[in-house]
Amino acid sequence: MLSPLTGSVADSWSGASYERIAETFAPIHDRVVERLALEPREHVLDVACGTGGVALRAARAGADVVGIDISADQLTKARQAAAAEGLEIRFDEGDCQELPYADAGFGAVASVFGAIFAPDHERAAAELTRVCRPGGRLALTAWKKDAWSDVHARAGRPVTYEIHSTEWATEEHLYALLGDAFELELEPGTWRIDADSAQELWELVSSSMPPLHAWLESVDDEARAHAQRVYLDYLAPGFFERGYVLVFGTRR
């Protein structure tokens, strides 16, 4: 497994307009909250919450919600969104590989395309397990390995920890991580964005996907231009579609 989380990794999840891409996950956020079937005042944890897509919905449903993320930048946006709706949500800055919460502290734990990006999958899975009470529920989503998973290498991006996140969508890996602690159900899903042009899609993903945005900011003009050509070619059909897995678990 790759090295533990560092400050540079935290930085890679800040600075982009993540709220724009997060808006396109709204149907997935809705699906996760519906699948959790939350009870009023139930303690809910949104892990790697980003701008608060699940946390906001859980609070609207009457749950007692905590969100945690490694990016202070994204948490600021989450707090602003909660304040705008008058929702009382506690947002903490922290690492999903070392959650600052008591054992069995939550009846429901969620993570939408979040905890899967932890460098150490075993540590992240152990923490998700530890904070979920017996009989509680876990819902997380993971991208399937697909052509988008490979386009990064063609664009010149180095292989980093987030490239391995698609392992969470494989049954063997999931059961190795969570199968001893949870009764698991794996449910497929599809996410899609339609646009008027490849350029419109490129503008969205390059500005709102934090690790991609951070990498583009770190390279020279020639490397950036090469990457843009590769990504535009991939996005040429005018839509961006990926398969994902919704993992639902009941804590033993």
Image (cartoon, helix red, strand yellow):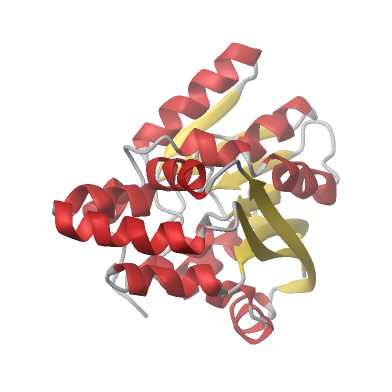
**Picture layout, residue 36 above or below residue 234:** above
Q: Is residue 247 visible?
A: yes
Residue at the spot 76% in from the left edge and 38% down from the top edge: 42
Pick whichever, 74 or 250, lies toward us. Answer: 74
Give the side of residue 2 with respect to residue 59, left or right. Answer: left
Quadrant including the C terminus: bottom right
Residue at the spot 53% in from the left edge and 58% down from the top edge: 236
Whole-percent x, y for residue 59 in the image: 71, 29
Quadrant including the N terminus: bottom left
Whole-percent x, y for residue 78 in the image: 51, 28
Residue at the spot 77% in from the left edge and 44% down from the top edge: 33
Give the side of residue 187 with respect to residue 229, left or right. Answer: right
Q: Can residue 6 be seen in this view?
A: no
**Picture layout, residue 175 above or below residue 127:** below
Q: Residue furthest left?
A: 220
Whole-percent x, y for residue 161 in the image: 36, 69
Whole-percent x, y for residue 136 in the image: 77, 56
Pick whichever, 29 or 192, lies toward us. Answer: 192
Pick whichever, 9 or 95, lies toward us. Answer: 9
Give the side of residue 95 with respect to residue 244, left or right. Answer: left
Pick whichever, 64 or 159, lies toward us. Answer: 159
Q: Residue 85 appears in which quarter of the rendering?
A: top right
Give the side of residue 74 with respect to residue 245, left or right. Answer: left
Q: How many labels does the image show?
A: 0
**Picture layout, residue 148 above or below residue 81:** below
Residue at the spot 29% in from the left edge and 55% down from the top edge: 9
